[in-house]
Image (tube, grey):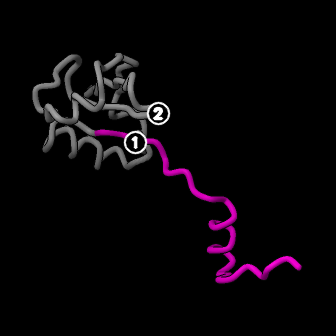
């Protein structure tokens, strides 16, 4: 069974770093580690138990870990709910309230 170690950032809310081996940050760029802060261990995740991990296909995560040595999970972008609704409805302009 292949595992990934997951760490959270003490500096950035809802930001997680996945590495192939626990406490091995050798392949993570120094600039990223500086912005991320001292990683706080969260858990080990078995990569063969779920199809979706960190909001992405398991195979994509495994490929990232093998090719780059890490994966950075950022929080979802907060969107303006009104703009999202209008976009979904394909409405371009909001009439002025009079």
Q: Give the range drawn in magenta.
A: 72-98
Q: Name the residue under label 1.
A: 74
Q: 39 or 6, which lies in front?
A: 39
Q: Residue 24: x percent and y percent?
A: 16, 21
Q: Tell me where residue 31 sits by quadrant.
A: top left
Q: 62 or 18, which lies in front?
A: 18
Task: Find the residue positioned furthest to the left.
Answer: 26
Mark 2 element type: loop
Q: Which residue is drawn at 40% across and 34% down?
A: 15
Q: Which residue is drawn at 21% across and 17% down?
A: 23
Q: Residue 96: x percent and y percent?
A: 79, 80
Q: Name the residue under label 2.
A: 14
| Residue 76 forms part of the magenta stretch | yes
Query: Would residue 27 be found to the left or right of residue 75 on screen?
Result: left
Q: Residue at x 46, y 31 (%)?
A: 13
- Compared with 27, 60 (above or below) is below
């Amino acid at each position: 069974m292949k595992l990934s170690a997951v760490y959270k950032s003490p500096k950035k809310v809802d930001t997680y770093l996945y590495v192939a081996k626990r406490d091995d940050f050798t392949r993570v760029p120094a600039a990223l580690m500086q912005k991320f802060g001292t990683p706080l261990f969260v858990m080990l995740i078995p990569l063969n138990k779920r199809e979706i991990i960190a909001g992405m296909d398991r195979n994509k995560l495994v490929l990232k870990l093998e090719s780059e040595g890490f994966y950075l999970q950022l929080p979802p972008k907060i969107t303006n709910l009104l703009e999202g609704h209008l976009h979904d409805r394909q409405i371009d302009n909001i009439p002025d309230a009079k």
